[in-house]
Every structure is written in structure tokens, then in C-alpha cells.
Amino acid sequence: MYKIELMASMMCADYGNLEREVKELDNGGIDSFHIDIMDGRYVPNFAMSLNDLKYIRSATDKPLDVHLMIEHPNNSVGLFTSSLRKGDTIYIHPEAEYHPSTTLQKIIDAGLIPGVALNPGTSVESARMLLRIVKKVLVMSVNPGNAGQMFLPYIREKYTELLKLKDEMGFEIYWDGACGSDKIKEYAPLGVKGFVLGTTLLFGKKKPYGETLKMIRDLL
């Protein structure tokens, strides 16, 4: 069995029962909670607030992966670093900031794990120097902003490029968007470390989360 990380995309959770959702995911064996923060400017949607993040952080001991889909994250990253704890991750989009390395250094100085998220239209080459700074690369397999989108086949080339670089540069690769069991079965053996699970596999399936998570791990 390959050791993979499974992350719950919490923008897909039932917000009428958020406490129960967190508890059931935690008990079901989720590895971390993925928090999408959207400002309605960098992406055409608003999703999850700082208060949502703080509640989930207080309700579990599992790590949080915070994905900042916001313009100029350097201006507000301190709000997020101060709400997290050691072992949590913050991803930024390189093109959302004039000097992304400065923002990444703030994340590092706060004792958190630095990451970059690459949109479908963002090349590996354009973020190459940042790959030496970060520990995680979140590859968007759909355009960012909304759940339930279709996988973009041309993203396969980006995974191929990153898999060749990850050991040399010291980062791990994570999958975000349209994550079906076929993608996990294909890419986990190649070296993709973690997968963000949303409506394709985890949420809205009317079965216990633990059962779904076991099924996914049993694939490998």
C-alpha cells in the first residue's frame, strides 16, 4: 500500500452540521482538512471565512491545509498564520502577488509549511524558482473557484514535469480538483503524495466517511 494523504475539501461540507462533519471526518480517518479561502476577486467566488478556519482548527487536532485564492496574500497572510499551528500549511498562488517569495517567507517564519498552488494555466517553469522554497505544490486539475468541475486532461503534462523535479528540489505534489478514484490509482504510484477530496468522491455520497476513505486506501 502506498502512503498517501487524503484531505477533505471543507467548502463541500454540510455547513448546517459543521461540528458533526468535522468529527465524522476525523473519526473516519481523514489526514487533514483543506480550507479554501476565496475573495471574489482572484477567483469569481467567495468561499470560507477566517471564522470557518478558526472553528475547524479548534475542532480537530489534524493538520489544516489553507489554500489562499486571494489577491495580494502578503497583505493579509498574518491573519491566517496567527490562526494556525505548527504542522499546518498555507498555499499561495504565485501570480496573485508581486513578490511571492516574501509571502512564503512570512509563512516559514510563522513555523508553518509553505506551499504554492498552480492553476491550470500556470506553467511549472514560471514558478520554478519558488519550488526551491516550498515544501508542497498543489496542482489545480480544474480552474479554481468552484466545486464539481471536470478534469482538464492537459494537466497531465504538468504532473509529469513536477514528478521529475520533486526529489531534486525537495517538495511533495498534491492533487486538487475532480479527484476520482481512477486518478488516485494512477497517480499515487507515480509519486503524487496527497489528494483533496470533494464532491467527486467524498461529500454527498450518503455513506459514512470512514467507509469511503477505507475504500480509497484499499485501491492501492
Image: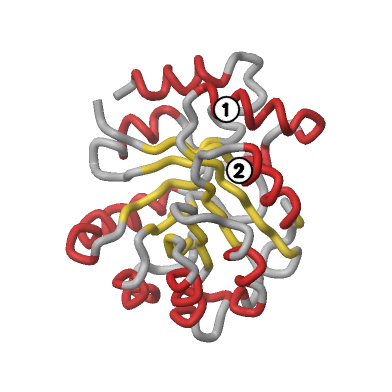
Tally of numbered discs: 2
Q: Amino acid at mark 2?
A: Gln
Label 2 environment density (alpha carbons within 10 Å; few <14, some 14–19, many ≥20) = some
Name the residue at 58% across, 65% down. Answer: 81
Q: Which mark is residue 49?
A: none
- Percent across and percent down for residue 42 are 67, 68
Residue 135, compared with residue 4, is above or below; it is below
Q: Image check: 111 left or right of 98?
A: left
Say which quarter of the image contains residue 71.
bottom right
Q: Are marks 1 and 2 in contact (CB under 8 Å)?
A: no
Q: Which mark is residue 25?
A: 1
> Is residue 178 visible from the viewing direction of this image?
no
Q: Which residue is the extreme one toward the left?
A: 168
Label 1 environment density (alpha carbons within 10 Å; few <14, some 14–19, many ≥20) = many
| Mark 1 or mark 2, whichever is nearer to me | 1
Residue 134, compared with residue 164, is above or below; it is below
Name the residue at 64% across, 40% down. Answer: 10
Q: Earlier in the sequence, mark 1 or mark 2?
A: 1
Q: Nearer the viewer, residue 20 or 158?
A: 20
Residue at mark 2? 149
Q: Nearer the viewer, residue 172 or 19?
A: 19
- Percent across and percent down for residue 151 are 50, 43
Q: Amino acid at mark 1?
A: Leu
* Helix, strand or loop at mark 2: loop
- Percent across and percent down for residue 79 are 66, 67
Quarter of the image with the C terminus is top left
Report, in whole angstroms, how far the alpha carbon at label 1 lies from the one at label 2: 23 Å
Q: Image check: 46 left or right of 169?
A: right
Quarter of the image with the N terminus is top left
Residue 27, compared with residue 132, is above or below; it is above
Name the residue at 54% across, 50% down. Answer: 142
> Is residue 204 visible from the viewing direction of this image?
yes
